[in-house]
Image (cartoon, rainbow, N blue to C red):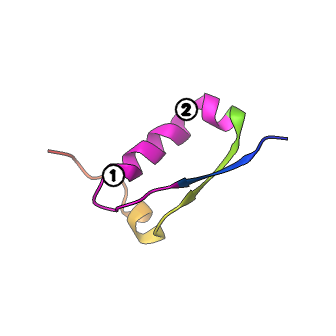
Amino acid sequence: MRPRIGLVMGDPSGIGAEVVAKTLALPATLAACRAFVIADARIIARGPRPRA
């Protein structure tokens, strides 16, 4: 059985959301574990924001 791994987004104004999204997009991540995200759903629902 694959372990459950929680990914914490951290500061909403930081790079945590981007790191979490890129990590979950990797097939190796999904093959290795059952990942779940710990974050404010309102921030996730807004989607990606352009970076300067």
**Residue 46 lies in quadrant:** bottom left
At label 2, the amino acid type is Leu
List the single residue furthest toward the right.
1
Q: Is residue 10 magenta?
A: yes
| Along the line of sight, the residue nearer the viewer: 47 or 22 | 22
Q: Position of residue 22 (x, y in %)?
A: 45, 38
Name the mark on residue 48.
1
Residue shown at 48% from the left, 68% from the top: 41
Callout 1: SS: loop
In this picture, residue 18 sits left or right of residue 38: left
> Of tags 2 and 1, which is closer to the observer?
2
Image coordinates of residue 2 in percent, x first then y, are: 79, 41
Q: Amino acid at mark 1?
A: Pro
In the picture, the disc for residue 26 is 2
State the image quarter where residue 24 is shown: top right
Secondary structure predominantly adopted by residues drawn in magenta:
helix
Q: Earlier in the sequence, mark 2 or mark 1?
A: 2
